[in-house]
Amino acid sequence: PSYDSQTGIFYMMFNDAQGFVASAPATYEKGKEYLGRGTGKAPPAPPAKQGVQAIDSKTGKVLWQFITSRASNSSGLIATRGGVVFVCTPEGEFMGLDMKTGKALWHYRVGGSITSSPISYAVGGQQFIAFTAGNMVYAFALPDIATASAKK
C-alpha cells in the first residue's frame, strides 16, 4: 500500500471475495489426516473482484477502484508526488494510474507474473521506478516534472 499525507488518501491492492467456513462432526480414522472437523458446500456468492483502490483515510470512503483480472497479495503499488500511482499486477502489467481518478495513464507488459512492489529512487536528480519480475529488474525513468511544467 501507499499513503499520500498531503491528501490523506490511502492506495492499496484489494481482493473482495466471499469467504466460507463449514464445520461438521468428523470421525477419526487411523492413518488418515484428522482436522477435527468435517466440510460442507459453500453457498452461492457474488463474483469476486480485485484490483487497486483509493480510500479517503478520514472517512473510509472508497474514492475509486481499478479492477484487475487476478488477485495477489504479493504485487503492490507506489504513489508518487507527480500524481501517478504505479502498480504491479500478477497478470504481468506495470501500470501508471491517475491518483485522482484511477484512470489508466500508461502500461507495460512483461513476459510473466509480477510478484513484487515497485520502488522509487533517484540518480543524479532523475527519478526512477523499478520492480522485479522473474529474474529481471525493470527500471523506468520518470520525466522531470519541473521541466515538463515549464514547457507548457
Image (cartoon, rainbow, N blue to C red):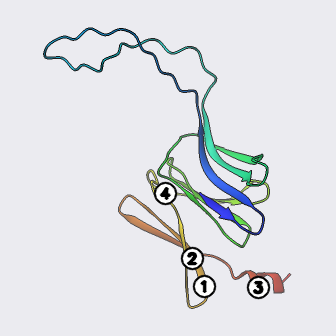
Q: Earlier in the sequence, mark 3 or mark 4?
A: 4
Q: Earlier in the sequence, mark 2 or mark 3?
A: 2
Name the residue that disc number 2 marks.
Answer: 128
Residue at the farthest left position? 31
Q: Is residue 107 visible?
A: no
Task: Work out how far the residue at label 1 is from the one at label 3, CA to CA, in angstroms.
Answer: 12 Å
Q: Which dot marks residue 126? A: 1
Name the residue nearer the viewer: 143 or 75. Answer: 75
Residue 70 in the image, given as x and y percentages of width and height = 54, 40
Q: Are marks 1 and 4 in contact (CB under 8 Å)?
A: no
Residue 44 in the image, given as x and y percentages of width and height = 59, 15
Name the residue nearer the viewer: 19 or 145. Answer: 19
**Residues packed near mark 2 inside 10 Å, few (<14), some (14 to 19) or many (20 plus):** some
Q: Nearer the viewer, mark 1 or mark 4?
A: 1
Q: Nearer the viewer, mark 2 or mark 4?
A: 2
Q: Label 3 sits on what residue type?
A: Ala
Q: Earlier in the sequence, mark 1 or mark 4?
A: 4
Q: Label 1 sits on what residue type?
A: Gln
Q: Are marks 1 and 2 in contact (CB under 8 Å)?
A: yes
**Residues packed near mark 1 inside 10 Å, few (<14), some (14 to 19) or many (20 plus):** few
Q: Earlier in the sequence, mark 1 or mark 3?
A: 1
Name the residue that disc number 4 marks.
Answer: 110
Q: Which dot marks residue 146? A: 3
Task: Work out how far the residue at label 1 is from the one at label 2, CA to CA, in angstroms.
Answer: 7 Å
Under circle 1, the secondary element is: strand
Q: Are marks 2 and 4 in contact (CB under 8 Å)?
A: no
